[in-house]
Amino acid sequence: MELFENQNHMFPADYAAIMQRIRNINPLKYSSTRNYINGAVTYLSPYISRGIISTRFVLGEVLKKGYNPADIEKFIQELAWRDYWQQIWITKGNAINKDLKTEQKPIANRDIPKVIINSNTGIIAIDEAIKAFYDTGYLHNHVRMYIAAISCNMAHCHWKMPAKWMYYHLLDADWASNALSWQWVAGTYSNKKYVANQENINKYCFTKQKGTFLDIPYEGFKAYQSPKVLQESIKLELKTPLPNVKPIHVDQTIPTCLYNFYNLDPNWKKDISANRILLLEPSHFKSYPVSQKSIDFIVQFSELNIDNIQVYVGEFSELISDFKHKNIYYKEHPLNAHYEGHEEPRESLCNVQGDYTSFFSFWKNCKKQLKY
């Protein structure tokens, strides 16, 4: 399929190219085409997930072009969804790693369908998307939902292993957005399970395929039996290929700004003299493994855009022990609870916090702050 491109073209590491991508956003076209595989999506998700830019910053840049917020509400809502998932992670913590509201049923195993891993489901749009995914680190959101529906609701795999597989390969890997979206599809964080048939896939992926295991009317899902092609599963062992350990230097007379997988903001405290350290903790990546492409992406971006950045492969406690340095600044994140020093807030679309039972109750409060 010509819809898929190579990684370097899709996600450049140069900050100026990212800014140009933001300037090119057409939020009206986004709203009307986003569900199609060639829709006018922003391709900003890796930069938002890595903390390079924020949802608030993106909206601010778009509004500078004179759009009426009421006319681009769908675009704004999609930014808000990212912050909503973060709030669930903040309030629920590690509970998001388990079925959050309702137990997933039925479950055949806690693995992942072999045909998903090998991109040979027999559904052309899905298989081509997975092949491109391995090359680019990108999946269209609709395709993510299709894959999750097949894995959870047709193959009856528990959502967590397939979600970890997807997170592993995604350049925009965000555990809250990823895990909770999988739970939404599997029905553990929603009122019903998400399913899609071949007609839906053909519509949004521009295929004309027939005769697949999804070529049924929607009422056929009520008595759906898992097809033979989905019954073989694989238990994955995902490991993060961290860089080799190299010595770093810490100047004790100046503060340290700590960057990590979720904070690569090149403008953060840019005007002060500081040690700038990209902390890659083995314990973090053991719990939340990512691919070589993801590691290469964050290291390349950091070295290209953050002056004098040094990469430290080790635990936060080891960093403190090695350098006896405590004047440390870092940004808040659910996985940073063990950090010590000066915690600073992340920037979000709205200052709406707390445990909201639904996105739209969260959105209602966001919209009040946006005042439109």
Image (cartoon, rainbow, N blue to C red):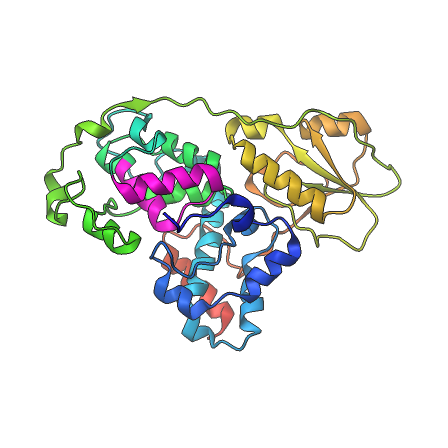
Range covered by the magenta-colored residues? 123-150
Q: Quadrant of residue 252?
A: top right
Is 143 included in the stretch rendered in magenta?
yes
Return the residue nearer the eye: 189 or 134: 134
Q: Please say whether residue 237 is visible from this viewpoint.
A: yes
The answer to which image quadrant residue 258 occupies is top right
**Secondary structure mostly seen in the magenta stretch:** helix
Q: Position of residue 327 (x, y in %)?
A: 79, 40
Left or right relative to 174: residue 360: left
Asked if the magenta segment contains residue 367, the reply would be: no
Q: Is residue 255 left or right of residue 312?
A: right
Please provide percent x and percent y for residue 165.
42, 32
Name, please, the residue furthest toward the front.
2
The foreground one among 70 and 118 is 118
Residue 191's spot in the image, x, y percent? Answer: 25, 48
Would residue 207 be found to the left or right of residue 1 on screen? left
Give percent across and percent down for residue 143: 34, 46
Toward the viewer: 304 or 177? 304
Does any portion of residue 188 appear in the rendered image?
A: no
In percent of the image, x 18 and y 27: which residue is there? 228
